[in-house]
Image (spheres, grey):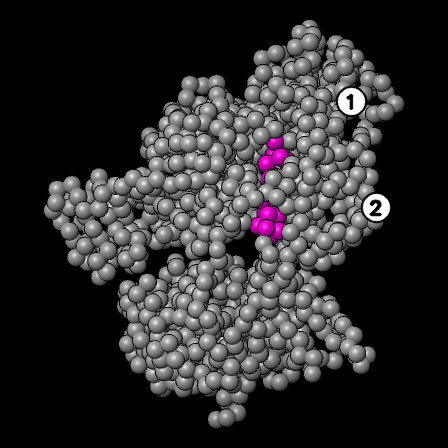
Amino acid sequence: MADFEPRIVAFCCNWCSYAGADGAGVARLQMPTNFRIIRTMCSARVDPEFVLRAFAKGADGVVVLGCHPADCHYIGGNYRARRRVALLRMVLEQYGFDPKRLKLEWVSASEGEKFQKTIVEFVDTIKALGPTPLQKEAN
Amino acid sequence: MSKSALVIGGGIAGIQASLDLADRGIHVYLVEKDATIGGVMCRLDKTFPTNDCSACILSPKMADCNGHPNITTLSYHEVQKVDGQAGDFKVTVLKKARYVNPKECTGCGDCLAKCPVKNIPDKYEYGLTTRKAIYIPHAQAVPRVAVIDKDYCNMIKKGKCGICAKNCGKGAIHYDEQDEEIVLEVGSIIAAPGFKVWDAKIATEYGYGRYQNVVTAIEYERMMCASGPDRGHIKIPSSGEDPKKVAYIQCCGSRSEKKGWKKYCSSVCCMYATKQAMITKEHGDLQEDIFFMDIRSYGKEFEAYIHRGEEEYGIKMHRGARVSNIEEDPVTKKLIINYTDDENNGVSEEFDIAVLSIGLAPPEGAEEFAQTLGIELNEYGFCKTTVFHPLETTRPGIFVTGAFAAPKDIPTSVAEACGSSAKAGAWIVDENFEPCAPKVYPEEKDVEGKEPRVGVWVCHCGINIGATVDVPAVAEYAKTLPNVVVAEQSQYACAQDCLDAISNAITEHDLNRVVVASCTPRTHEPLFREACRNGGLNKYLCNMANIRDQCSWIHMHEPEAATKKAKDLLRMAIAKACLLEPLVGSEIPVTNAAAVIGGGITGMTAALDIAAQGYPVHLVERENELGGFARNFRHKEDGVAVQDFLAETIAKVEKCPLITVHKGAEVKDIPGYVGNFNLQLTDGTDAPVGAVLFAVGAGAYEPTEYNNGSDAKVMTQTVAEKKIADGSFNAENVVFIQCVGSRSSTVNYCSRVCCAASLRMAIQIKMNNPMANVSIVHKDIRTYGFREELYTRACQLGVKFLRYPVDNDLPAYDGNVVKAYDTVLGAEVEIPVDALVLAAGITPMREEKENLAKMVKVPISKDGYYFEAHQKLRPVDFATEGVYVAGTAHWPKFMDECIAQASGAASRMLTVISKDKLISEGIVASANHARCDGCGVCVGCCDYNAITLVEMPNGTLKSNVNAGLCKGCGCCVASCPAGAMEQRGFKNKQIIAEIDACLDFPVGGE
C-alpha cells in the first residue's frame, strides 16, 4: 500500500477557505496533489448529499473548509456546516467508514499556511487509513 | 454630460470616495502619484481590532475601483494646477512616463527577471529589500503593470541596454515615452493624499539607523507580513535568529516638544503596537513589552483589544514609561532599554528587537500640494478643517478625507471618504444632472434547450502555469471531452487580445458556454464574465478552472501530477459549465427617499446632505425638539458656539422643503428591504423609503457614585459646563474624576470624549481663576490627535494630574477630600474638594437600540452599540442592505467625527436611493413549489430572513424566497429535506456533476 495515492475532494467556501487556498498558491506553499477543490459560496451550501456522493463515487476522503467561527461571510453558515459535518461523521461511521475520512477545518482568507497544513495532514491521515472501504469491497 | 469629480490619492480613503461617487452615477478621475493604488493600507499585515488581513480586505476594493465603468484610474499621474472654481475646475495633471504601455503589459514579470540594474531600495518594502530598474510595485498592484525607474534605467539614461524590451513578448515597453500634460474638467475635488510616517532618524536617542535591531513599526509590519521580504518569518535583523524579546516604544515622534518631534498624538500607534505584539506572539513564544505614557484605546472595542493583549497574550504593559534612550551591546547587538517600573525602580533590560511606534506626519510635499490646490494647512501641516465642517478645505468645492486632515485610523478614513463624496457630489448633482449611462451590451443569445457548445481557453500565464503544467496537453485533452467545440491555449488569457478572442468566438463557433482554465475566479471571474457579455452571452454561462493558484503554484516540483490535476480541474469545470443556466438578477424597484431616525447633529447633517442632492428625507425625532445631546453643550469650537451652530443647523433643516421633520414621534416598525422600506411612525406616518439611517445617539451615564445628586459639591461634566458658562461655578479646589461609568468592571469600554471635556473645563476654570487648584484624577489621558494641545495647555496652566491604577476602584471621597493613589508618587494623596466633577461616561441605550434593531434585523455589539457590516471597511453600513448607522449610535465620538460620519452615511444611502432599480445577484435561492411540503426548515436557517412560508390558494404552505433579501449562501438548499430548494449557479445537479466528473475518471482522465 506504499504507493497508495488517495483521492480527496475539498469543499471550500468562496470567501475564506477558497481564498486561503489561493493564498497558499500566492505564497508558493507546496503540498501533495491528491485533492480537488469544489467551490461553494458558503460551507453551509455543502449538502450532506455532496459528501455522501463523493464517498459513493470512491473518494478516500472529504474535507470541508469554512470561515472561522464568527467570521462567516453569511453570518452563521459555518456553524450549520459544523453541525452537519458532525452528524455526517456519525452516519459515515454507521456505514463502516472511519469518521476521520471526513474532516472539517476553518481556514481564513489570510491563512495559506493553515490551508497547506490542513491538506498535508489530511493526506497523511487518509494514507494511514488506506483506500476507501468501498474499493476494498470492489476488489 | 455632467461634470466629473476628481479624487487625488489612491489609498483606502481615495478608493472609497471614488467608489461611492461612481456608485452614485458620477464619473470619477482617481489620480494617484505612485504606479499602483492601495496606499499604505496595502502594505500592512493585519488591521486592528479584528486582525483582518489587510491585503485581503483591500484587494477587492482595488479591483472594484480598477474595473468600475465610472472610474478612470490615473495611476502614476500627478496634479499640477487647479484653475477655476467650485462646480467648474480645470485641473492640469502630469501623466508621468511609465515607459510601459498598461494596455499591452500583462504583468507577467518576464522583463523584471532579465533587468541588469539591481539593488535599488524597494520603496514598497520601505527599503527592506531591493528591486530592479523595471519593476512591478508589488504582487497585488493595481494596475498590475510594470514601470521603469528612469533614474536607474541604462537604456533611458545612456541609450544602452534594451534587454527588457527584448524580453517582453507583448512589445509593451517604449523607451521613448515622454511625460505628458492632460487637463481634466471637474465639478469638485477630494484631496486624499494620506500621510507619511515620521522619520525615526530624528530620534537619535533610540539609535534607529545606527542599531540594526531597532526598526520602525512600518518596517516591522512588512517583516511580519506573509507577503513581506521574509515571508512573515520574524527574525532578529542582526543575526537572523528568532527573537526571544521584543520591545515596542510608543510615541516615537509624537507628543513631544522636542525639535523635529510632533506635539500632537498620532492616534493609531497604541493600537497598532498592541496588534503587532499580538500577531508576533502568534508567530512564536516570546516576551513582549510595550512602553507608553498613556494607552489610548478610545475606539470601538479597542479597550477590550488591549485587555486581550495583556491577559490572553501576556503582553507586558508599562504605563507612564517613556523610554529615555536605547543602548546597544556592541558584541551581542542586543538592545538595552532603561525604564522605570511600577515601583519607581530604575530597570535596565535587554531586548532582541525594539520596534519604534513612529507617528503620522503630513504627506510628503504637503505644502506644495496645498499651494497647487489653493487650500490652507493648519499649524501642524495637515489640511485645515473645522469641527463643524470636518470635510471641507478652505477652498469651496475642494474636500478632504483620510489622514491628510489629521492622523486617523482606517474606519474613520473610510467613513470620511464616503462623507467627502456626498459633499463633492452635491457640487455635481443639480436638476440637470445625468448619471453615467450604464454600458450597453449586445443582446444575449438564447441558450434555452440548446446542446451545450463549450469553448475552452487554457492559460500559460507566462510561465506561471506553463512551467509546471503541460498546457498544450491540457488543451488537447479538453478537445476530447464531450460538448467541447473549441479549445485554445493562451499566453495570457486575461490580456485584451484573448478577451476579445473569447467574445468573438462566441459568435464564430456559436458557443453557449465558456470555460477558462487559468487563475482564481475570485479575482478574474468578473473579467471573463465581462468578455462573455461583450460577446452576447449571459455572464453566468462562464466557468473557471483554477489551475494556477490551486495547482501549478502549489505543485511546482510535480509537473506530471500537476498536469493530471489540471486536466481533472478542467474536466470538472466543463461538466459544471454544461449544466449552467443563464441567470438574471431580479430587478428591485427603489423608492427615491430616505428615512433618518434621530434628530441630533448626526441625523440633521445626514438629512441635509441627502436633501442637497435632491432626495426627500423623513427625519424622525422622539423629543419635541431637534438638536439631540448637543443642546447640553455650552462651549465654543473654532470660535463658534455649539449652540449657534446647532440653531443654524436646525433652521436649515426646518426650512428645507425636501426634509419632513417628525418631532415627538417614534418608530413603530420598518418592514421591507433595501430600496423598499415602509417607515411607520407613532404619529400615523406610513412612508415608503429606500434606505434608513439609525442616528439615534447614545445616553449620558447618570452616576450614583460619590453621592451624586445629594452632595451639592458633586456634579457631572454636563452640569459643570453649564455652571461655568453661566458664571455660577466659583469653587477654589476642583477635582475631576475620570472614567466614572467607563472602563470599569461593568462597562468595559472608554467613552472617548470625557478626557477632552474635563481638560477643556479645567482650562476654562484656570483661565477664569488662576489661583484655583484644579486636579484631574485619571487612568490615562486620551486626548488623541490634535486634542493633545488641550493636555499641553492644561499642564502649562498648572492643572495637576494624578494617575490612579487602571484596575483599582474609583478614588475614595468623604465629602471633604478625595483620596487617590498616585502611581507616579507611589503614595496615597489627599486633595481637598469644593467641587467634584464626574466625567460620567456615555451609555449605549441598549434597549432603545434593540427595539429598532429587531425591526430591520441588525446586530448589536457586546457593548450595546450598533454593530456595523465590517469594522474596518464598512463602518456605516449594516450587513442588512439599505440600513446604515452613524454618530454615537455607532460608538461614542466627538462632534466633528459625528458630522463626518453622518455625511458618510448620507453618501452610502445616496448610492441606493439615487437609483431607479437595483439588480440583485443572480445566484440566489429559489423554491420548487412542486416539491416543497412547507415544513419551514429553510425559514429558520436563513440568517437574512429572506424566506417566508406563504399560503397557496389551496391552503398549503410553500416556501418563498425574496430575491432582494437573499445573499446566495445556499444554506437553505442544503437544509431542505424535500430537495425543493435550489441555488442558482450552485444547483445540486451542477455540483454533483463536478463531483462525478472528478471521481468517475481515473486521475488525469486517461
Chain of the residue where label 2 is placed in the rendered structure? B
Q: Is residue B903 visible?
A: yes
Q: Which residue is rendered at x = 42% and y = 53% of the image?
A: B66
Q: Is residue B875 above or below residue A109?
A: above
Q: Residue A51: x, y in percent?
A: 57, 78
Q: Which residue is mark 1?
A: B719
Q: Residue B368: x, y in percent?
A: 37, 27
Q: Amino acid at mark 2?
A: Asp
Classified by dominant secondary structure, the portion drawn in magenta counts as helix
B37 vs B546, nearest the viewer: B37
Magenta residue check for B899: yes
Counting every numbered tag in the picture gives 2
Q: Residue B403: x, y in percent?
A: 49, 35
Q: Quadrant of residue B820?
A: top right
Please indicate whether residue B47 sits to the left or right of residue B232 in the image: right
Q: Is residue A133 visible?
A: no
Q: Which residue is rendered at x = 51% and y = 36% of the image?
A: B401
| Furthest residue in direction top, as rendered | B771
| Furthest residue in direction bottom, as rendered | A139
Start and end of the magenta stretch?
A: B896-914
Regarding mark 2 in the picture, which secondary structure is present there?
loop
Name the disc covering residue B78, or none: none
Q: Amino acid at mark 1?
A: Val
Q: Could you confirm whether marks 2 and 1 are on the same chain?
A: yes
Name the disc covering residue B683, or none: 2
| Furthest residue in direction front, as rendered | B432
Q: Quadrant of residue B81?
A: top left
Q: Residue B866: x, y in percent?
A: 69, 46
Q: Which residue is rendered at x = 52% and y = 61% of the image?
A: A16
B471 vs B199, nearest the viewer: B471
Q: Which residue is rendered at x = 60% and y = 64% of the image?
A: B587
